[in-house]
Image: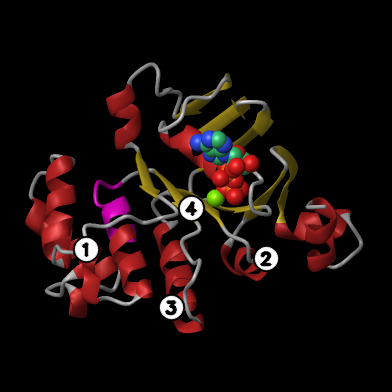
């Protein structure tokens, strides 16, 4: 399984948000997507998911593009947007049933229990979403993103705004999900990437300025990782 992003660009008015970037992701890989605010991370993710159309370039997931077969393509992807918009008046289980129905999942009761366990939502399953902490809301978003067993997970800043305990838990969850999926997740935290990623993509002003394994990145430059990151994003 693989995701192939090839020379994609996106312009909004006169400004170039994503500038001719290419990369691939293979099965089992956890890839961190780093870069300052406005670098083009979310725009890239939206193009991969199919929410935005690239002006130029191609994106293929297992050889299939969104344009070729939108339904088949979308079924392979789980997406946690930056805002993690949830229906907060719904109960956790009710919300997951609603999402499962949207995916036409067969035997939804079993699958809902599975994702509840996988995301550690057991004690929260009968609570209303608006009663949950930010960390648990992220888990609900994550459960909704994986319910249809996607082979590619796109997570846009899944750990932003979490306290240190929640952060550790969500990182562990991301790592555990990588057994069955390719994962691309954006973050501002370099340590997070070194903790759970196999590889890092660094975007700056729409351009891909690094695509390397953590060790290779550190070796290529002689400075420490923090210094490298600063260099790449200035
Ligand atoms: N819908 C939009 N309309 C106009 N400009 C946009 C839109 N979405 C993103 N941008 C611009 O594109 C650039 C990249 O944004 P974004 O992809 O959100 O970056 P990041 O996620 O790395 O912070 C920014 O300059 C942003 O203002
Ligand atoms: Mg963003």
Work out whether residue 124 or residue 64 is closer to the camera in this orientation and state it.
Answer: 124
Please provide percent x and percent y for residue 8. Answer: 61, 26
Q: In which quarter of the image is residue 130?
A: bottom left
Q: Residue furthest right?
A: 222
Please provide percent x and percent y for residue 233. Answer: 78, 52
Q: In which quarter of the image is residue 106?
A: top left
User: Which residue is labeled 3 in the image?
Assistant: 166
**From the Cβ of disc 1, is ligand 2 less than 8 Å away?**
no
Q: In which quarter of the image is residue 41?
A: top right
Magenta residue span: 142-149
User: Which residue is labeled 2 in the image?
Assistant: 190
**From the Cβ of disc 4, is ligand 2 less than 8 Å away?**
yes
In-image side of 66 versus 91 (left or right): right
User: Which residue is labeled 1 in the image?
Assistant: 88
Q: Which one is earlier in the sequence, the residue at label 2 or at label 1?
A: 1
Task: Mark 4 vs mark 2: give the one in front.
Answer: 4
Mark 4 packing: few (<14 Cα in 10 Å), some, or many (20+)?
many
Mark 4 → mark 1, Cα distance in angstroms: 20 Å
User: Which residue is labeled 4 in the image?
Assistant: 156
């Amino acid at each position: 399984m693989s995701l192939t992003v090839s020379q994609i660009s996106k312009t909004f008015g006169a400004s170039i948000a994503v500038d001719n970037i290419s990369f691939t992701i293979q099965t089992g890989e956890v890839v961190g997507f780093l870069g300052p605010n406005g670098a083009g991370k979310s725009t890239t993710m939206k193009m991969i998911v199919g929410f935005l159309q690239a002006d130029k370039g191609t994106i293929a997931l297992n050889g299939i593009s969104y344009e070729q077969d939108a339904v088949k393509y979308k079924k392979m992807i789980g997406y946690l947007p930056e805002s993690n918009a949830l229906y907060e008046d719904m109960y956790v289980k009710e919300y997951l049933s609603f999402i499962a129905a949207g995916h036409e999942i067969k035997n939804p009761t079993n699958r809902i229990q599975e994702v509840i366990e996988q995301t550690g939502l057991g004690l929260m399953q009968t609570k209303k979403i608006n009663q949950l902490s930010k960390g648990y809301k992220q888990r609900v978003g994550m459960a909704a993103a994986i319910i249809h067993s996607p082979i590619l997970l796109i997570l846009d800043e899944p750990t932003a705004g979490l306290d240190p305990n929640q952060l550790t838990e969500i990182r562990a969850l991301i790592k555990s999900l990588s057994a069955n999926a390719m994962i691309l997740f954006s973050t501002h935290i370099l340590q997070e990437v070194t903790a759970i990623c196999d590889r890092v993509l660094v975007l700056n002003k729409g351009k891909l300025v690094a695509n390397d394994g953590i060790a290779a990145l550190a070796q290529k430059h002689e400075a420490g990782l923090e210094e490298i990151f600063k260099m790449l994003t200035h």
